[in-house]
Structures are given as C-alpha cells and as structure tokens.
Amino acid sequence: MYHISLRPETWFSYPLVTQLAHVGSEVERSILWREKKPEYMKLAFFRALELLDLTIDDPKNALGLKELCRVREFLVDYFLYDNVYGFDDASWRKYFMTFALAARK
C-alpha cells in the first residue's frame, strides 16, 4: 500500500470528481517521470492505481463502474504494456483535467 494513512472510509467521503482529480495527479506524475526516471514513473503509476482501485470499490460510484474499470484497463495498457488502445499523454491529461477543474468548483 502506497497511501499508508489513507483509509477507505476517508476516500469514500470525497466526491467522485475529487477522487478522479487525485488519480489524475498521480497519472500526471507518471507522465512527467517516464523519460527522466522510470522507477519514479512506476511508483507514481502504482499510486494512481491504488487510488483508482479505491474509487472503483466506493459504493457510491457503482453506476460508473464500467467506465472506471475501463480507465484502469487503458492506464495499465498505456504505462505497462503495448498501448494497443492508442492513448497518448495529451489524451490522459485532457481526460483527468476535466475532473481537476470540476473538483475546484
């Protein structure tokens, strides 16, 4: 576990947009570290997965479960495998920026 002090009930108290904004922050770190220090990229990516898994486990997000699981699948493919779905850094930034902006309001 990467977020040692984060308890599921605390995470579940955040709105979905806030949860995904936090996931997006870790995805952004993964993108930034990819070329500089791949070991840092993996750490940031696994933190993103941990937060995304908590988001998937959150009962209030049941209606969006399909999308959340697909995002997880696409992220794993993008960062760890062959990117068969054809994503790029810009598409991930655009996807998660929407949540970051919504969380600020």
Image: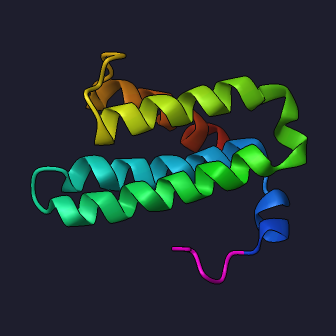
Numbered range of the magenta stretch:
1-6
Q: Is residue 75 left or right of residue 52?
A: left
Which quarter of the image is occupied by the N terminus?
bottom right
Residue sitting at 78 percent across and 49 percent down? 57
Pick the front one: 72 or 24: 72
Residue sitting at 71 percent across and 49 percent down? 55
Q: Residue 36, how many percent across, how many down?
A: 10, 58
* Whether residue 9 is visible: yes
Pick the front one: 72 or 16: 72
Farthest residue toward the right? 60
Pick the front one: 21 or 46: 46
Which image quarter: residue 78?
top left
Majority SS type along the magenta span: loop
Q: Is residue 73 above or below residue 46?
A: above
Residue sitting at 64 percent across and 32 percent down? 69
Q: Is residue 29 left or right of residue 72?
A: left
